[in-house]
Image (cartoon, helix red, strand yellow):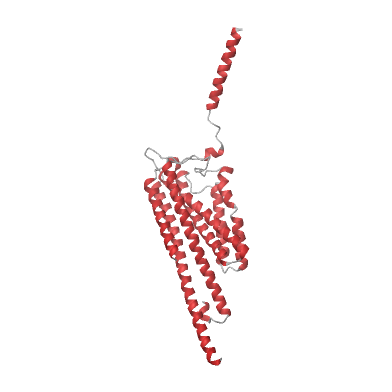
Amino acid sequence: MRWVSVSAAIAFTLLAGTLFVAWWVAPVAQCDAGCLSQKIFYFHVPSAYAMYVAVGACVVGSIGYLTTRTSGWDSLAQAGGEVAVLFGAIVLTTGPIWARKAWGHYWVWDPRLTTMLLATLVFVAYLSLRSSDAGEAERRFSAALAILGAMILPVIHYSVQLWRGQHPTVITRRGGGLDPVMARTLGLAMLSFTVLVGVLVAWRARTAWLEARLEAMRTEATTLGLLGEEGSG
Amino acid sequence: MRRTLAAWTLAVGLGSLGGRAHAQQPRAETAADSRSMGFQASGGECRETVPGGTMLAVAYGVTILLLGAYVARVAFRAHAFERSLTRLEDQIARRAQDSGHADGPAA
């Protein structure tokens, strides 16, 4: 568990540093970009990126599970799915707060917003499928759902370029660009969230693996008659 | 002849000026260009009708709260599973020992 403490400390320090730089060092943007509330960008964009990483972990775990049927891969998939929903919730909360300031509305049915909501709901469905006592069939079905659900990620990414919408495309080649100090702040935020998502997925995967091991031990002990009623609870 | 040459020179000159002027026209803006928005540092004072600072604090607060709640939940579960696992291992070892003692004299 030492690695969890060390990596969590690194993630926390980086996150605190990002918060400090975003709040006090990064300049305030022009008013049509939200003025002070534009600084939401430094948590909003890295959260979306962290969600992509978590979904990637979920897909890798799901493919691994479908291939090998071992609890280690399943734990990785579960961790990825859970962390993806967490970061999806952050994106879907911080985005509308910025939009209220910049667009005058909390929510518009913009292609990127809609596809992001859809992706988050897919992984909420994935988690609810696993939330009850998930057997072999549920685990296989949820693995397939995660792989299919991940296919929406490229649609989210290219939705701004493919269809009309209001969402800004600041950091793409066709985007309007970013002030150098803002770009460096965003770089720091991306680094923080990369470490954070890695720590969260690894830690949650270990917890899920512990849970699976506990269940397996309980079942085995009960089968062998080593446990009475008190051990099954 | 001289007039024709002068008219020809004038036409070519005006044409080239027109071409250069046309080349300086901004490229037609595509739908993607019009949607993109650069984030540039603002020089002057921002006049805000919606309090940006409060919204920023709320957004950061929500982010930290969600992350904190999730970390607390995972930490609680990890601790609970580790404790259950240790208890189960002890229980199994005790039972195995007891059954070993019970089998011992009979064997």
Outermost residue toward the top?
B1
Q: In the rendered view of the protein, which quadrant contains the C terminus of chain B?
A: bottom right
Above or below, comparing residue B89 to residue B65 in the picture: below
Q: Could you tell me which residue is drawn at 45 percent across and 58 percent down?
A: B67
Q: In the rendered view of the protein, which quadrant contains the N terminus of chain B?
A: top right
| Foreground of the two, B75 or B91 | B91
The number of numbered badges drawn on the structure is 0
Q: State left or right for residue A122 relative to residue B51.
A: right
User: Residue B17: where, in percent of width, then height?
Assistant: 54, 20
The reply to whether residue B51 is in sight is no
| Foreground of the two, B82 or A31 | B82
The reply to whether residue A75 is in sight is yes
Outermost residue toward the bottom?
B106
| Foreground of the two, B34 or A43 | A43
Q: State left or right for residue A137 relative to residue A106.
A: right
User: Residue A165: where, in percent of width, then height?
Assistant: 55, 43
User: Residue A192: where, in percent of width, then height?
Assistant: 44, 53
Q: Could you tell me which residue is drawn at 50 percent across and 65 percent down?
A: A206
User: Residue A109: where, in percent of width, then height?
Assistant: 55, 48
Above or below, comparing residue B74 to residue A162 in the picture: below
